[in-house]
Amino acid sequence: MNKRIARRAIAGALSLGVVAAGAVAAQPGASADETKVRLVVGLQDGVDSSAAVKAATAFGGKATDLVAQAREAMASLNARTLEVPASKQSVVAAALRAQPGVKYVEVDRQGAHTQAIQPNDPYYVSGDQPEIDQARLPAAWESTTGSSSVKVAVLDTGVNRFGDIANAVAGGFNYVSNTGNYADDNGHGTAVSTLIAGRGNDGAGMAGSCWQCTIIPVKVLNSAGDGYWSDIAKGITYATNVGASVINMSLGGPGGAKVLQDAIAYANSRGVLVVASAGNNGNWDYGISPTEKMYPAAYADVLGVGATGYGTDGRAYYSSYNKSGDSWVDIAAPGDDWIPVYNPSKKTYTYGLRSGTSFAAPMVSGAAALVKAKHPKYNGWSLLRSIIASGRTIPANGWTKFGLLDVAKALTITTDGTAPKVTVTSPGQGARVHGSVTLKTSTSDNWSGVRYVDFYVDGKYKARDYTAPFQWAYNTKTHANGRADYSVRAYDKAGNVAVANRYLTVDNIAPTVWIQSGPANNAKVKGTVTLKIGAYDTQTGIQRVDLLINGKVKKTDKTNPYSVSFAASAQPKTFKVQIKAVDNAGNVKTTAVRTYKR
């Protein structure tokens, strides 16, 4: 991370909810495309993005996520990215916010940057990796060296098939240029990948953590190590959708973004562990406080990784850390590591010691991959718990929440194997309903906690709620009249599921009602007036009939044959009479008005 980029990341921060953002000025010597501003437009569920794109196009804007992989990744987050002229940024943002169904509009900053720094001393260490023993990897390798079925996505500057990872790479995509070419033009991503999956015990190069696991390269940072939040969000959803168990992000910046947060929640909800470096602000580098939260590391359910120094369990001078009361830096790992070092001018590699939380994070990701290989049924929460529950105490701790990475112990940590509890509290079993009905639930979990609840109707998925109290409003008018079978499935963070079933009777047909006998419209009445009522309902039956005088209920009859009476003398000189029938699902039908005089 260099000072120019760091300052730009801070200055470019945009608070959500600001209606008119200032235009972003072109940098001196900037190319034409750098005078453009990228916007992320978040949409409500089910809203077509074409209107938002058309609104931007009217001002010279264009969609940037045009290739299928980019469009599909953003569709998972109900969002689109648009590029607009900097001079039109405020106008376009306001126009987009005015569009129906637009949830948010934010500037897509290059808010993330690699967390690698230059070494303290320019020495080259050959074959010496003290971080391996420090993280207790040899003891872990006695249990497992990994599995090719365990996929670790590396969201970075790309990956080159070099050395110890030449045969470890599969799949991949480039969201910087929206192509399948994920070649690393910086070297950072290849180094990170080698720390995770460098093949060990092969008589060459260096040893990574998970010798058998598979790397999925996802290029989200350019050759300078910069990346847009939306490209990183796309990378997260892509990695999730292609089956990654762990996502490593050795990158970060202040502020974060809604689209990034949504993408992480998307990954978490599908059982993926997200690991991110905490940042290199330990010396107030780039003018950023050592305790300022860096994203994505500071998001909930992201494993934020700080760094210990070379040959010590103490905090590396460069590592960001928790201030009192904070806990976003979860775990520490060695950050001064032996890695392949890329020479971009010669496009060659050597090996050397490099420093940064960028290199601490892949130590943790590799450890999580080993846990996944040892315990294939563990999901992201279980992997996270294995790492944090095994952290060992380190000097002057408090700068991390759970101490130092201990891979051997992480393999021994158990997970939550008990399903949560869920019941449907309303409506009651067999209830007769119409219109919109809210299914309310009661949930509990004795360990990991409930992550979300899914709702099904007649075996078909309908909705998901992530927030307690978990409930869902269903428009029964989309369902045929008659029995509807509801299934509520509660998932805890460890992936256990509990199911509650309930059936309801849907009735959206109004009853039939008429006045069988009684004074005609405009009749003069006196004494006791009796109206005999005919009413029936073919779906759920009649609950009651009501006598309305001047719009107010005066009498009710629940027994067939139905009749109601009233004293004419108790009414105004002229008054209006109606009969209302209510069926057992709550549907209502009212007769035409009869006007009476006395």
Image: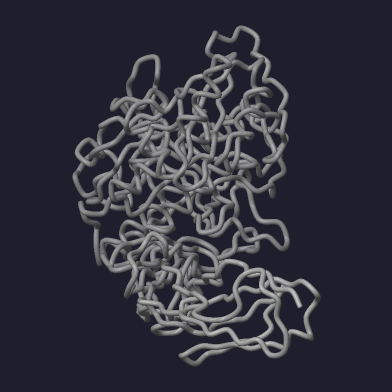
Which residue is outermost to the bottom? Answer: 559
- Where residue 180 appears, as percent x and y from the top left, is 28, 27
- Where residue 320 appears, as percent x and y from the top left, is 63, 48
- Where residue 462 appears, as percent x and y from the top left, is 38, 60
Q: Residue at x 80, y 75 (%)?
A: 573
Q: Nearer the viewer, residue 24 or 113?
A: 24
Q: Nearer the viewer, residue 587 or 80?
A: 587
Q: Residue at x 29, y 53 (%)?
A: 210
Q: Nearer the viewer, residue 156 or 84?
A: 84
Please state, as top left, top right, bottom left or bottom right, where the C terminus lies in the image: bottom right
Q: Nearer the viewer, residue 530 or 62?
A: 530
Which residue is outermost to the front? Answer: 524
Is residue 597 placed above or below 84 in the rendered structure?
below
Please state, as top left, top right, bottom left or bottom right, where the N terminus lies in the image: top right
Q: Give the quarter of the image for residue 166.
A: top left
- Where residue 559 appears, as percent x and y from the top left, is 49, 92
Is residue 162 placed above or below 429 in the rendered structure?
above
Q: Give the quarter of the image for residue 194.
A: top left
Is residue 424 placed above or below 299 in the rendered structure?
below
